[in-house]
Amino acid sequence: MAEVLVLVELNPAAGGPRKTTLEALTAARALGEPSAVVIGAPGTAAGVKDALAEYGAAKVYVAESPEIDDYLVAPKAEVLAQLVTSVSPAAVVIPSSPEGKEIAGRLAIKTGSGFLTDVTEIAADGTATQVAFAGQTIVHSRVTTGTPIYTLRGNSVTPEPAPGAATEETVQVTISDAAKATRVVERVVEQKSSRPELTEASIVVSGGRGVASAENFSIIEGLADSLGAAVGASRAAVDSGFYPHSFQVGQTGKTVSPQLYIAVGISGAIQHRAGMQTSKTIVAINKDPEAPIFELADFGVVGDLNTVVPAATEQITARK
Amino acid sequence: MNIVVLVKQVPDSGSERKLDPSDNTVARATADNVINEMDEYAIEEALTVKEAQGGEVTVLTVGPDTATDAIRKALSMGADKAVHVSDPAIHGACAPQTSAIIAAALSQMEYDLVFCGAESTDGQVSVMPALLSERLGIPQLSGARKLTVEGSTARVERQTDGGYWALEAPLPAIVSTWDTINEPRYPSFKGIMAAKKKPVETKSLADLGIDPATVGLATATSTVVDFAGRPPKGEGVKVPDEGDGAEKLVGYLAAQKIV
């Protein structure tokens, strides 16, 4: 069976692989037998190997070096390119983070291949599905040159366990001087949150201009916490200074695709739709019955968020 | 300081955007075309560096003849001159091919810093700094929310989920900017008038030493097989809050087995 390389993305906060890695292992099975590739500091593979075995990794290539995390993107792309050259995989699947996309791009140049970013599905014949233009257009694409490289958008595929042997193979790491150009001096966490990461969460509760103030975002956070959800914000809310930019959902922010998206006080401008339109179920709460967000909503409440949301939070909490 | 800003003309993300069914490429000819929004932050940052350190800002764009509108916008903000790579053979080029064209153009220019927006609102691939870094052997400082340039070193705060990575690289380097980095200036009337007289050099693939057969739709490294509009959503339910909005909402979530 053809071998498909899957780059492992780590979860530095919680340890282990990010959920996107398990999604990538699942999606890769359409193309062949997935082998996981762990590139990181010494000891990294030990923390993720069990999860990789559970989700079908036949092999685990372990490329560990204390230098890898000292530099941006380039060392990982270099190691992955060496591996692609030596094992000639049928394809490479990478979780679609900013770093993952940059690794994919560099790998494409190094190996003379084509790459497709933010794919939501990969078919057995290699055709990938992408969502374009604010979610309005569904595109099917193929790589026509070299080894197909895909980055898989988070929450597009449901991770399914499938036992794999996870046989370890050590990869010798030598990083060229060229790959050491951009040094990562420090990784700074400014917002520690117990909430799930926005692009991984199965439920997202977002607030917009209608929330009216930064203080009032506690209403959004309250509903999110009652549902175990991530918190998002529209561009209008972020531009008004109600919530930090890293939580922005939309064209110039994050694209999310959760099971449930609750839009509170969000009118539904195209800029916002671009980031949430592919959510499975959409619920909207807005006092304006004509707000375009209702065109997308499976269920909408026309009312004042300041009374509806706290009451809903209370009832959800009471049901537990 | 020689500064180059990469600018892309894109269909306005606020208008209807389409693919052209004849060859599955972005329908640019019929679109409401504007400068890529994120590029304005790159231009602003380039002008800020120039104002602090002296030098010259050159706009570089690859695109059809209509892309001159995007170039004029950048010049009216304060960039000094422009290079416009335009060639019918480029139509349908993929990201790796486009990066080869930009890299070839940059190789004919002097640069200490190259800027671009962190993403284009049409393709949203967001990897041009990585591709150019790979091709030109210069460091990438991508996804910046803050930049400082001291002597021959550039430092960037790369925006991440819930924080940032502090990056450092020697010049020349390529920096991509998010909309958190600055507030782009509006072109003044004087700037708009001055832009009309600023030099714009047009280059073909032959000028860059690129064989037209190696770029464009026919040889692109990936291809769009087909596309379709998103199937319309079924009619949703919209209820008024008559003191029972929360109950109705929670009732719906319960029916969906969410709570």
Image: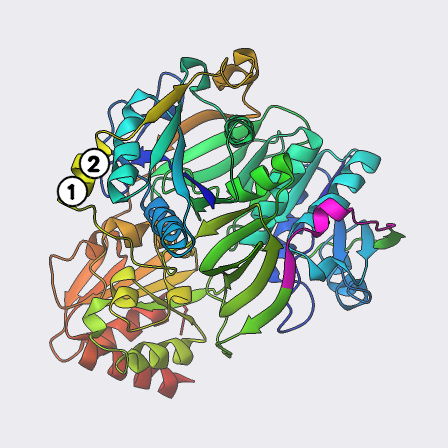
Residue A96 in sight from this viewpoint: no
Give the residue displayed 23% in from the left and 34% down from the top. B195
Provide residue A108's location: percent of width, then percent of height.
64, 35
The crowd level at tag 1 (other Cα within 10 Å; few <14, some 14-19, many 20+) is few
Residue A151 in sight from this viewpoint: yes
| Left-right relation of B162 to B18 | right
Above/below status of B127 relative to A281: above
| Left-right relation of B67 to A141 | left
Which image quadrant for residue A67? bottom right
- Residue stretch in magenta: A171-184
Above/below status of A197 relative to B141: below
Residues under numbered marks 2 and 1 in contact, where contact means CB atoms less than 8 Å apart: yes
Q: Give me the C-alpha separation between circle 2 and circle 1.
A: 6 Å
Going by the picture, which residue comes out furthest to the front? B54
**Residue B194 got which mark?**
2
Looking at the rendered structure, the kind of residue marked 1 is Lys
